[in-house]
């Protein structure tokens, strides 16, 4: 398939095939954006891991989970913040500042909030139909992140000491 034949608006394609009505993105809460963003991010990471080679499912899961846990996403958003435009930054902040009644099992409150913002940003781009930008940001995030081989721990990238508190 050539690039000109690829439909980058996966949401529109799904809506068309399943005969679902479109809704205005602004009507979705930041937690709904994070919910769909979590799903699309998981799909992208699983695709990357599977495409690296056929392995046992348990090994695939272990590799993918290094990238999808809250601590990893929190670190990744630090890499992405300088790359975001005003609209994307707003989507991130809405997710980060959303009042959630749950937390990640093994993450600090700050990591969980930043991860929720990360997922809300991805959900916003997905529902907006901007898969190209979504994939561009995921690629930059993954390339700027180095998971530690030790289970449950990650090394921080060069910008680890920075926070987005002042944003």
Image (cartoon, rainbow, N blue to C red):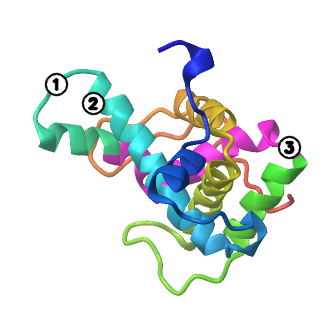
**Which comes sooner in the sequence, label 3 or label 1?**
1
- Secondary structure that dominates the magenta span: helix
Number of numbered callouts drawn: 3
Give the distance between the C-alpha atoms of the residues marked 3 and 1, in whole angstroms: 37 Å
- Element under disc 3: loop
Please name the residue shown 70% across and 40% down the image: 80
Q: Position of residue 52 (x, y in %)?
A: 29, 21
Q: Magenta span has 84? A: yes
Please, what secondary structure does the residue beneath circle 1 have?
loop
Evaluate if marks 3 and 1 touch, with contact meaning CB atoms under 8 Å apart.
no
The disc, 2 or 3, on the residue closer to the chain's N-terminal end is 2
Dot 2 crowding, Cα within 10 Å, few <14, some 14–19, many 20+: some
Task: Write the start and end of the magenta stretch as one range.
Answer: 65-85
Say if mark 1 contacts mark 2, CB within 8 Å.
yes
What residue is at 47 percent from the left and 32 percent from the top? Answer: 146
- What numbered label is drawn on residue 54? 1
Q: Which mark is residue 85?
A: 3
Residue 110 appearing in the image: no
User: Quadrant location of the C terminus?
Assistant: bottom right
Q: Residue at x 67, y 45 (%)?
A: 129
Real-space CA distance between mark 2 and mark 3, rounded to the nearest whole angstrom: 31 Å
Which residue sits at x=86%, y=60%? 166
């Amino acid at each position: 398939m050539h690039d000109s034949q690829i439909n980058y608006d996966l949401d529109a394609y799904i809506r068309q095939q399943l005969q679902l009505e479109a809704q205005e993105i602004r009507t979705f809460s930041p937690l709904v954006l994070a919910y769909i963003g979590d799903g699309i991010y998981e799909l992208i990471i699983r695709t990357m891991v599977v495409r690296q080679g056929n392995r046992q499912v348990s090994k695939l899961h272990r590799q993918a989970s290094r990238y999808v846990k809250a601590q990893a996403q929190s670190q990744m958003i630090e890499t992405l913040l300088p790359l975001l435009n005003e609209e994307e930054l707003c989507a991130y902040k809405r997710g980060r500042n959303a009042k959630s009644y749950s937390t990640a099992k093994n993450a600090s409150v700050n990591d969980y909030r930043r991860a929720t913002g990360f997922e809300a940003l991805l959900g916003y781009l997905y529902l907006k139909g901007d898969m190209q930008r979504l994939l561009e940001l995921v690629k930059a995030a993954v390339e700027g992140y180095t998971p530690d081989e030790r289970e449950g721990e990650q090394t921080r990238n060069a910008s680890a000491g920075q926070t987005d508190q002042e944003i």
